[in-house]
Image: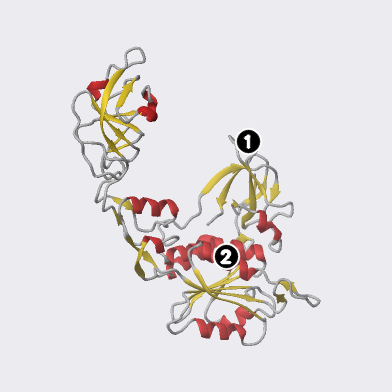
Amino acid sequence: MDTVSGSGGGLRTVEEQLADVLTAVRPLATRAVALSEAAGATLRDPAVARGGIPDFDNSAMDGFAVRFEDVATASADSPVELTVVADLPAGSPDDPGLRPGEAIRIMTGAMVPTEADTIVPFEDTAGGLDESLTTARVVAAPARRGVFVRRAHDDIRPGDVVLGAGARLGARQLAALAAADIARVTVSERPRVVVVSTGSELVEPGVPRSRGQIPESNGLLLEALVREAGGVVVRRERVDDGGPGLRRVLDETTSGDARADVVITSGGVSAGAYEVVKTELGGALRFSRVSMQPGKPQAFGVLPAGTLVFGLPGNPVSAAVSFEVFVRPALLALQGRATLERPALRLPAAESWRTPPGRRQYLPAVIDRGDPARWFVRPATPGGSGSHLAGTLALAEAYAVVPAEITTVEPGDLVDVLLLGG
């Protein structure tokens, strides 16, 4: 990698801007909900097991519950024949007795009888399932006492913390809580978010356009990103560069019982004319230049009612990267999420590319998995990291993050990679 020293130009670092954002965050209120209503929510109190996993000794196989000493010497040449005295399907409350020379037919998940200590699967008997109702002819000795018995509380004991506060409740987490007999959990309220796209040149996709107009895409982009981060978009608007549109939306969504927790605008924060966010919110937000590419112009502030306002650049890649770096961590922090950062890898570059001097680069990237033992990272498109290249976002599965002092990435250079997803 080629390097250059210093960022210069009076730019703020990414860390300085993010610190201002997170300092302003106040976690949202909590509520108790049933597990069926908790998918995607953030756990705010530890989830404590009511039952154990498993809750009782149970069979890991379809077969026979036996006494180990009865079958310890069984082999194909010298099978052991046992009399079947009971039948236990999963869910049966029965606990039949077991004397020497006897076996109990048992199905996977059924509670192991008190007097049995080992399970012989059907595969280790001469007759298998078809001849299992009266006699079990064991042709292979169990490897040890207790084989194929799932012991009670091997995984979780009653009173154990299954998940700590700050965990996101996805499919696997909800299943674990249910298995531990937890019916309700305390979760965070979801952030209520308003998304506003600014720009007189914007029209809805598919609508006939006049000269100089473009399809509006940032609203859909930001709405989807908010949902992925656990938020709820309560309103999405498009406003012109002139007139009272932005102020009207803010007045309607930042007061009263329906107050939004977060407002995200795109466009109108640069140094040019007709920058409606600067015009309308110049006294309420701090407008900064951050040493990153794309996404140098940023605005952030807190309205008197407590609503967080993010002013993001208007170019689509800039808006996406800015959301990733500043807005997503804030949305997660509002919910009390334990981890605010994306999963990251360090991968060798598959090809060379240039980076902006003095600014940290967030390059939309793809991961080359051609060799399963050695992954590589490469730009998502040949166009690189131009902030207007919205098509790049469709292919990107990661951001390659290159430090500000690096000017060129060469093939084989190790690059930090943020994995994108929900």
Q: CA distance from mark 2 to mark 1?
A: 32 Å
Q: Is residue 142 visible?
A: no
Residue 118, above or below 320: above
Residue at 35% from the left image edge and 69% from the top image edge: 31
Residue 40, above or below 398: below
Query: Observer-nearest residue: 134 or 225?
Result: 134
Q: Three-letter amino acid code at disc 2?
A: Ala
- Helix, strand, or loop for circle 2? helix
- Residue with the mark numbered 2: 224
- Helix, strand, or loop for circle 1? loop
Q: Picture coordinates of residue 200 (x, y %)?
A: 70, 79
Residue projecting furthest to the right: 211
Q: Picture coordinates of residue 179 (x, y %)?
A: 34, 50
Q: Residues within 10 Å of mark 2 (few under 14, many from 20)?
A: some
Residue at 35% from the left image edge and 58% from the top image edge: 165
Q: Picture coordinates of residue 259 (x, y %)?
A: 46, 80
Q: How is the image coloured?
A: secondary structure
Residue projecting furthest to the top: 77
Task: Say whether residue 384 is left or right of residue 113.
Answer: right
Residue 234, above or below 72: below
Query: Observer-nearest residue: 388 or 206?
Result: 206
Task: Say whether residue 79 is left or right of residue 250.
Answer: left
Query: Observer-nearest residue: 170 or 139?
Result: 139
Residue at 54% from the left image edge and 45% from the top image edge: 345
- Residue with the mark numbered 1: 371
Q: Is residue 127 visible?
A: yes
Q: Quadrant of the N terminus?
A: top right
Label 2 vs 1, first from the N-terminus: 2
Task: Say whether residue 27 is left or right of residue 227.
Answer: left
Query: Observer-nearest residue: 19 or 236?
Result: 236
Q: Three-letter amino acid code at disc 1?
A: Asp
Q: Report the mark closest to the observer, 2 or 1.
A: 2
